[in-house]
């Protein structure tokens, strides 16, 4: 061993000094875990849900949304609390509004998936969420549906032909659709908004 060579300052380590008195291995441990020695991390783990939210933070938009600054999955914020990864808006709801009632979902009044503003969140059933979507005209209907064969003008024309007494099979052939499509238009099962 070279007597002029500096050694790592960790007890029992005979590796050469690299930085801050530590060898390469212990220096990496210091940066990753907060401590150069072996064993588990000495950095405190986030155990409080509110701390987990504040740790990553959010940006307030002009609409009043608190858009999650942390990691996202399909535009929904993700946060890890006590080792469990979950949606940030669910954690925000529970932190500031209380527990999510059994059988309920956390829904957004603002329709902004990364928003964690507790005043924009509400607990509701799947039907409540669908009703909210329909009331805001966000549902996929009519020409918004990529499977739609007819447009609004054609549907109006179908209705006029139905009122004139034209048979559904004739109308279906004219527009190159199934007779059941014409029937659904006539009974209001489809294209109600037109």
Image (cartoon, rainbow, N blue to C red):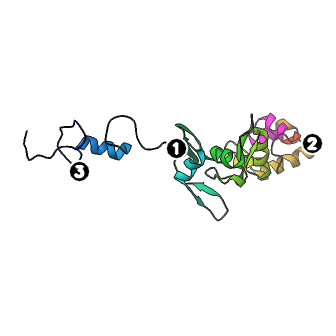
Q: Quick one: label 1, few (<14), some, or many (20+) residues within 10 Å?
A: some
Does 1 lie within the magenta span? no
Q: Residue furthest bottom?
A: 62
Q: Is the residue marked by circle 3 packed among few (<14), some (14-19), or many (20+) residues within 10 Å?
A: few
Report helix, strand or loop for mark 3.
Answer: loop
Mark 2 secondary-structure assignment: loop
The residues tagged by marks 3 and 1 sit, at their Cα atoms, a distance apart of 29 Å
Front-lying residue, 37 or 68 = 37
**In this rendering, would 54 be left or right of 134?**
left
The N terminus, quarter of image? top left
Q: Name the residue under label 2.
A: 165
Whether residue 176 is in magenta: the answer is yes
Closer to the N terminus: mark 1 or mark 2?
A: 1
Which label's residue is closer to the chain start, 3 or 1?
3
Mark 2 vs mark 3: which is more N-terminal?
3
Q: Is the residue under label 3 in contact with that under label 2 (CB below 8 Å)?
A: no
Residue 175, quarter of picture: top right
Residue 64, image x, y percentages: 67, 61
- Magenta segment's dominant SS is helix
Give the residue pinned by disc 3.
19
The residue under label 1 is 46
Label 1 residue SS: loop
Residue at 25 percent across and 51 percent down: it is 20
Tags 1 and 2 in contact by the CB under 8 Å rule?
Answer: no
Packing grade of label 2 (10 A; few <14, some 14-19, many >=20) is few
Percent position (x, y) of residue 41?
A: 40, 39
Q: Nearer the viewer, residue 47 or 175?
A: 47
Asked if one can make out residue 8 in the rendered structure from this viewpoint, the answer is yes
């Amino acid at each position: 061993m070279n007597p002029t060579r500096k050694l790592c300052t960790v007890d029992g380590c005979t590796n050469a000094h690299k930085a801050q008195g530590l060898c390469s291995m212990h220096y990496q441990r210091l940066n990753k875990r907060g401590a150069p020695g072996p064993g588990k991390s000495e950095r405190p783990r986030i155990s409080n849900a509110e701390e987990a939210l504040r740790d990553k933070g959010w940006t307030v938009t002009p609409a009043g949304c608190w858009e999650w600054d942390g990691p996202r999955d399909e535009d929904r914020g993700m946060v890890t609390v006590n080792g469990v990864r979950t949606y940030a808006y669910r954690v925000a709801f529970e932190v500031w509004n209380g527990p999510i009632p059994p059988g309920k979902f956390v829904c957004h009044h603002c329709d902004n998936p990364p928003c964690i503003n507790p005043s924009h969140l509400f607990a509701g059933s799947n039907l409540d969420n669908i009703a909210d979507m329909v009331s805001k005209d966000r549902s996929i209907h009519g020409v918004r549906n990529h499977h739609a064969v007819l447009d609004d003008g054609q549907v109006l024309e179908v209705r006029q032909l139905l009122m004139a007494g034209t048979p559904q099979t004739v109308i279906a052939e004219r527009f190159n659709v199934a007779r059941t499509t014409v029937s659904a238009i006539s009974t209001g099962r489809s294209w109600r908004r037109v």
